[in-house]
Image (cartoon, coloured by chain):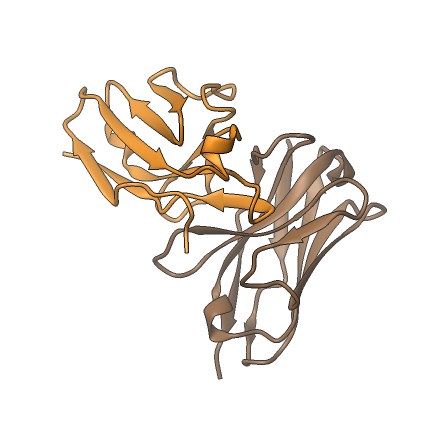
Chain colours: A brown, B orange
Amino acid sequence: EVQLVESGGALVQPGGSLRLSCAASEFTVSDKYMSWVRQAPGKGLEWVSVLYTGVTTYYADSVKGRFTISRDNSKNTVYLQMNSLRAEDTAVYYCAGGPLFSYYMDVWGKGTTVTVSS
Amino acid sequence: QSVLTQPPSVSGAPGQRVAIACTGSSSNIGAGYDVQWYQQLPGAAPKLLIYDNTNRPSGVPDRFSGSKSGTSASLAITGLQAEDEADYYCQSYDSSLSGYVFGTGTKVTVL
């Protein structure tokens, strides 16, 4: 079964760092555009970052300069390194993948929760 | 803040038809970028419902249909069922942001 499994969510203090992982099964992450999408408590979906083929990456303005998306092909895993975390980064973080040359996401993980609080 | 605007809520009785509008601008929907729709059931991850404006992934009932015109798109649900009660989000690409954008979300209530 094609699936994504996120991990790494935790309670972290403001200014701290965290790395989220997203492991893929039954498909190769380098064959899809891989994204992170987050959802703050009681709020809507917010796109965070995308990793296209190669090393091309884009970020939402709200996380630019603080978050980094990357991929390890040998582990078939995508990561989101989050630095200088703020209270407003508190959310469920979903990993999602979509076909190359398209802007939709057809595979989603169940999400991992990040809470930024002192 | 979301770039695509949706009504906060819509409701209908079982069997009725409801429609959800998604309004964008000249840098996203109006620029020709495709629109997707996702369904999010309570406590669950989003699920792709419609892609490339009108296409349904395998397994999505044909009660769900999408359309696009100008700077807007719409999701229609016909023959509304209790299991359709969920949050629905539109999504596209925005050239000025160089990224994906989501709608504000619409809660569908089955009366």
Determine the residue positioned at 57% across, 42% down: B95
Q: How many marks?
A: 0
Which residue occupies the extreme right position in the image? A74
Q: Please give left or right for residue B16 compared with residue B90 in the image.
A: left
Residue A93 in picture, x, y percent from top left: 54, 56
Task: Pick whichever, B74 or B107, lies toward us.
Answer: B74
Q: Please give left or right for residue B96 compared with residue B106 in the image.
A: right
Placement of the N terminus of chain A among the 4 image quadrants: top right
Residue A64 in picture, x, y percent from top left: 62, 63
Determine the residue positioned at 38% across, 61% down: A41
**B35 versus B5 height, above or below:** above
Determine the residue positioned at 62% across, 46% down: A35
Q: Please give left or right for residue A12 compared with residue B5 in the image.
A: right
**A19 versus A17 height, above or below:** above
**B22 versus B62 height, above or below:** below
Which residue occupies the extreme top position in the image? B62
Task: Pick whichever, B19 or B3, lies toward us.
Answer: B3
Residue A63 in picture, x, y percent from top left: 58, 63
Determine the residue positioned at 57% across, 74% down: A85
Residue A104 in picture, x, y percent from top left: 56, 34
Quarter-of-image position of residue B50: top left
Which residue occupies the extreme bottom position in the image? A118
